[in-house]
């Protein structure tokens, strides 16, 4: 089974929340409502490298979310 790098997720325990899940290293869940990130893997590297990597990952996650929302809106209209 091939799992995409990013997934959207929700949960009935937090009905207003929507999460972007990154399934590859470094794995994380981004709560879009609270704008909080939970890292599942320990991040290693220099501070500068980590800042660059995290910034790139969050930009990619944001682009994924926006693309998915556009596709969803196209489907319902």
Image (cartoon, rainbow, N blue to C red):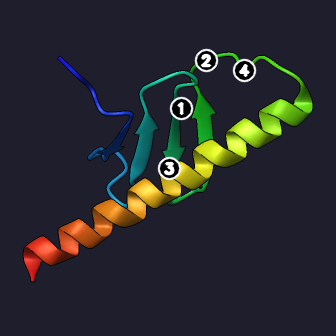
Categorize mark 4 by other alpha carbons within 10 Å: few (<14), some (14-19), many (20+). Answer: some
Q: Which residue is mark 2?
A: 41
Q: Which residue is mark 4?
A: 43
Q: Are marks 4 and 2 in contact (CB under 8 Å)?
A: yes
Q: Which numbered disc flags the more N-terminal residue, 3 or 2?
A: 2
Q: Which numbered disc flags the more N-terminal residue, 3 or 1?
A: 1
Q: Which numbered disc flags the more N-terminal residue, 3 or 4?
A: 4
Q: Give residue 71's quadrant in the image.
A: bottom left
Kind of element beneath mark 4 = loop
Up the image or down, 7 lies above or below 27; here it is: below
Residue 34 screen position, x and y as percent? 57, 56
Residue 66 screen position, x and y as percent? 40, 66
Q: Is residue 36 visible?
A: no
Q: Which residue is mark 3?
A: 61
Q: Is residue 51 visible?
A: yes
> Label 3, label 1: how many angstroms apart (C-alpha)?
10 Å
Up the image or down, 45 lies above or below 15; here it is: above
The residue sitting at 9% across, 83% down in the picture is: 77
> Label 4, label 2: how many angstroms apart (C-alpha)?
6 Å
The residue sitting at 42% across, 47% down in the picture is: 19
Q: Which residue is mark 1?
A: 28
Q: Quadrant of the N terminus?
A: top left
> Label 2, label 1: how many angstroms apart (C-alpha)?
8 Å
In the picture provided, is 45 more to the left or to the right than 19?
A: right
The residue sitting at 79% across, 32% down in the picture is: 50
């Amino acid at each position: 089974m091939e799992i995409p790098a990013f997934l959207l997720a929700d949960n009935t325990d937090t009905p207003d929340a929507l999460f972007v899940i990154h399934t590859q290293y470094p794995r994380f869940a981004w709560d879009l409502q609270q704008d909080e990130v939970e890292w599942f893997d320990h991040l290693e590297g220099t501070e500068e490298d980590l800042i660059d990597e995290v910034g790139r990952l969050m930009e990619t996650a944001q682009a994924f979310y926006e693309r998915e929302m556009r596709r969803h809106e196209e489907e319902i209209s």
